[in-house]
Amino acid sequence: MRSLPRMHALSQRAAVLCGAAAVAAATLSTAALSAAPAQAGVHRADAAPAARLAWKKCGTTAHPTLQCASLKVPLDHSDPRGRKITLALSRVPHTAKTSQGPLLVNPGGPGGSGLTLAGFVASALPAKVAAQYDVIGFDPRGVGRSDPALDCAPGHFDPVRPDPVPLTPGVEHANLTRAKAFADACGRKYADVLPHIGTVAAARDLDLIRRVLGADRISYFGYSYGTYLGAVYARLYPERVRRAVLDSVVDPTGVGYENNLVQDLAFDDRHRAFLAWVARHHGTYGLGADPERLETAWYAMRAELARKPADGRVGAAELEDTFLPGGYHDGYWPYLAEAFAAYVRDGDTEPLVEAYEDFGAANASTGNGYSVYTAVQCRDTGWPRDWGRWREDNWAVHERAPFMTWNNAWYNAPCAFWPTDAGRPVDVANDRLPPVLLFQATGDAATPYRGGATVHRLLRGSSLVVEDGGGNHGVTLSGNACLDGHLAAYLTDGTVPRGDGGGEADAVCAAGPDPKPLDVRTSAPPPGETLRTLLGFRP
């Protein structure tokens, strides 16, 4: 996509999805969350005078009214007078005579920067709705322009990486060595910081942002992992939530290891949907009308690149990175199909290398995003320390879902060697909130449907809007008028749809049409491209 929608999938991989831990991992009880030490710390901070933010203009051509500021927060929330770190904030101020207060936005990850997302949300919402809010973006602790910004091992994703599928002991050893080296590097560089990077710490940062904004309550809009962050904040501070929108919902009952295994199956389904779409457009791509034959051709391409990487850079791992965006959004299918067809039909690797450069290659933000991703994932919950467990589980899933199972396993494998103790995932069940609005596509691969259904059950009074037949990730503000109508109504006056009790969904919106083949040299970016850039790709 270097000449098309320019985006680096791998560089943004850490910006979308929460990984997962075993369902059996212990969860924080209601008593634990309301325990005196944690709450006392929050109340002591509330009693202290809040700092003032010095907002400065930082507008861009796309978002000219954007403002930026920074906020110092405790590294360790149990020691509010101890070492401070800095969070980077952004704002699009309200313009209406009457304000509905701050709307904090988060793109997910963990590891995603939210500074530009504030400008996007403010411009993508209906003008009358956006005008009523101060839309607030932020880089969570460790991310982007916040300080310190983690970068454990620059160059970790430089090509060519070992084949993700460990068919020999040597390949497995090479991948294990990379994973352990990354974890060790993080431990050496950030030993004092890593114990304080996690979702609960980030949620407590959110409340300090609320305080410094002078708001008694905040509204919140989170995508992907941002849904888990929002749900954790709501559990810790239910009285501080005015409205909350959670789009593409992480399953909080499988945070960590378990969610990643479930995700592998869903991404394989989306990859097969892509191949079926290419088959339906045989007239354009000339690869045949049988999806199974195309699947065979794709894996043959993978095997050839594993033996001889294209341009010395695109091996098996890099190929998987390149095609992963198709699992997030079908708008990329025409570009991926062109690269696939050129390779299979003509042996032409140039389009494939170009696609890698635009979808899969690392850039300057890769190291930071991935470092925060692992720091949060590995700290939030316990991952298996016995590699034999990983080997057994991932081979079993690979048999059913070969597209990205092992790629995903190695992406998360540093958690098997992580240098800090693990926390416990938060039980986000909540009956103390105003209505929360949830959005979920039935075929979402990054955060499969069960996440939205589960959180709908856990948040009493919430409302679930389902995009029926949709397979994209991050579905609001991407061109679906039905979904966006529910979003606008909710942010305007709190209106949520209510079902008749006949199913899980309170409202159902039809998915948009599949993409059409296009001339990738001249066509406009696919719908939702701007949001896709901000959310990124993972795993």
Image (cartoon, rainbow, N blue to C red):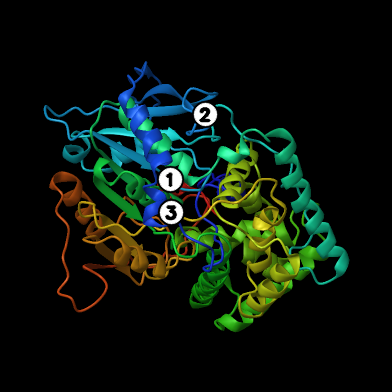
Q: Give me the C-alpha separation between circle 2 and circle 3.
A: 21 Å
Specify the label residue 146 is tagged with: 2
- As drawn, 166 above or below 161: below
Are the residues tagged 3 and 1 within 8 Å (C-beta)? Answer: yes
Q: Residue at x 21, y 67 (%)?
A: 507
Near mark 2 (Cα within 10 A), the count class, few <14, some 14-19 or many ≥20, is many
Q: Answer with mark 1 or mark 2, whichever residue precedes in sequence.
A: 1
The kind of secondary structure element at disc 2 is loop
The kind of secondary structure element at disc 1 is loop
Near mark 1 (Cα within 10 A), the count class, few <14, some 14-19 or many ≥20, is many
Q: Give me the C-alpha separation between circle 1 and circle 2.
A: 16 Å
Residue labelled with disc 3: 224
Q: Residue at x 64, y 68 (%)?
A: 405
The residue closer to the viewer here, 436 or 48, is 48
Near mark 3 (Cα within 10 A), the count class, few <14, some 14-19 or many ≥20, is many
Residue labelled with disc 1: 107
Q: Give me the C-alpha separation between circle 3 and circle 1.
A: 7 Å
Q: Position of residue 419 (x, y in %)?
A: 70, 46
Tag in front: 1 or 2: 2
Are the residues tagged 1 and 2 within 8 Å (C-beta)? Answer: no
- As drawn, 218 above or below 310: above
Q: Position of residue 436 (x, y in %)?
A: 25, 54
Q: Position of residue 93 (x, y in %)?
A: 26, 27
Q: Answer with mark 3 or mark 1, whichever residue precedes in sequence.
A: 1
Q: Which residue type carries mark 2?
A: Ser
Q: Which residue type carries mark 1?
A: Pro
Q: Residue at x 42, y 64 (%)?
A: 515
Regarding residue 412, the answer to whether it shows in the image is: yes
The residue closer to the viewer here, 498 or 388, is 388
